[in-house]
Image (cartoon, helix red, strand yellow):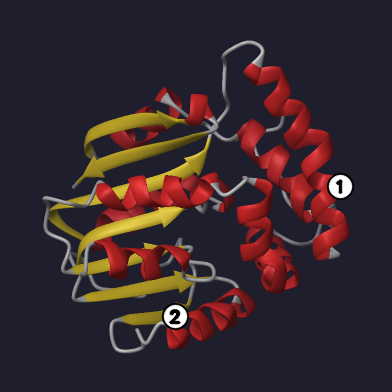
């Protein structure tokens, strides 16, 4: 099995460039498809990830691969930090996010920035907490991206990752794989007009080092207190770490 996959088959473009183009192309449909294809369960996943920040310092939060700002908006409603900066490589996703933030009257509390998750434009020890929802799977260099998040965290700060994982329980595993591999790409292709985006979703989940593998990578990167919590029979997992 290949260790890394890209959305498109163009040899001359790196994964980072292709991921940016893919999300630009599906930005208008992203929120609808997220909720529709997950039957709305993704909302509860985000709430559980945010709740991991309760009881710890979270005044200044960085949300990496913020997309359309779903997580920052929900964080502001749920735990009321002083400031959230959301960073993403896709300008079109950020445009959708800006509109959502405006509708919620959160322009002063949430700032969105265009940037590279593997080269964060912030000083060391800048944030109380760092979050990323469904984004680390898309990093071109996973360890570099994790290292950057560790760098900008304050000592003792907490990182929360929410990411798809692979269920192992029979027959749920087989049903999940069939849906992800055959049904979801067809729906995504028809709705988003990008024939590759949701095929890439399945392939990227298959090669991603989930569960204990990611815990080991976090440990290798220098994080402490690394934990993995499986959600919905293993479709998704929450990873928590401290600097």
Task: Using the image as rendered, state which of residue 93 and residue 127 is in the foreground.
Answer: 93
Q: Quadrant of the N terminus?
A: top right
Say few, some or many: other residues with alpha carbon within 10 Å of mark 1 (under 14 / 14 to 19 / 20 or more): some
Question: At 36% from the left edge and 28% from the top edge, which residue is drawn?
Answer: 216
Per the image, label 2 sits on a secondary structure element best described as strand
Mark yes or no: residue 195 visible.
no
Q: Position of residue 102 (x, y in %)?
A: 45, 88
Q: Which mark is on residue 186?
A: 1
Question: At 71% from the left edge and 18% from the top edge, which residue is drawn?
Answer: 174
Q: Position of residue 72 (x, y in %)?
A: 37, 68
Per the image, label 1 sits on a secondary structure element best described as helix
Question: At 47% from the left edge and 66% from the top edge, which residue is drawn?
Answer: 70
In this rendering, the answer to whether 105 lies above or below 71 is below
Q: Which residue of the protein is positioned furthest toward the front in this rendering?
A: 39
Q: Quadrant of residue 119?
A: bottom left
Q: Position of residue 61 (x, y in %)?
A: 26, 66
Q: How many marks?
A: 2
In this rendering, the answer to whether 85 lies above or below 184 is below
Question: At 34% from the left edge and 84% from the top edge, which residue is drawn?
Answer: 106
Q: Which mark is on residue 20?
A: none
Judge left or right: residue 236 versus residue 12.
Answer: left
Q: Which residue of the protein is positioned furthest toward the top in this rendering?
A: 170
Give the label, 1 or 2, closer to the camera: 1
Q: Quadrant of residue 94?
A: bottom right
Q: Which mark is on residue 113?
A: 2
């Amino acid at each position: 099995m290949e260790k890394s996959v890209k959305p498109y088959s163009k040899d001359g473009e790196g994964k980072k460039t292709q991921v940016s183009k893919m999300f630009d192309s599906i930005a208008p449909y992203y929120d609808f498809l997220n909720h529709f294809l997950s039957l709305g369960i993704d909302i509860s996943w985000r709430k559980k990830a945010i709740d991991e920040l309760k009881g710890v310092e979270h005044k200044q939060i960085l949300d990496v691969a913020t997309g359309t700002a779903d997580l920052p908006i929900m964080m502001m409603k749920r735990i009321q930090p002083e400031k959230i900066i959301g960073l993403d490589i896709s300008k079109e996703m950020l445009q959708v996010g800006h509109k959502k933030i405006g509708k919620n009257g959160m322009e002063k509390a949430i700032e969105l920035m265009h940037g590279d998750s593997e080269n964060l434009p912030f000083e060391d020890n800048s944030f109380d907490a760092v979050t990323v929802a469904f984004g680390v799977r898309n990093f071109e260099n996973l360890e570099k991206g994790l290292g950057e998040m560790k760098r900008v965290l304050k000592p003792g700060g907490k990182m929360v990752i929410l990411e798809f994982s692979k269920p192992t329980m029979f027959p749920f595993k087989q049903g999940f794989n069939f849906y992800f591999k055959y049904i979801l790409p067809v729906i995504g292709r028809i709705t988003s007009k990008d024939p590759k985006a949701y095929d890439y979703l399945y392939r990227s989940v298959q090669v991603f080092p989930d569960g204990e593998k990611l815990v080991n990578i976090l440990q290798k990167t220098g994080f402490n207190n690394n934990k993995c919590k499986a959600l919905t029979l293993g479709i998704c997992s929450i990873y928590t770490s401290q600097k």
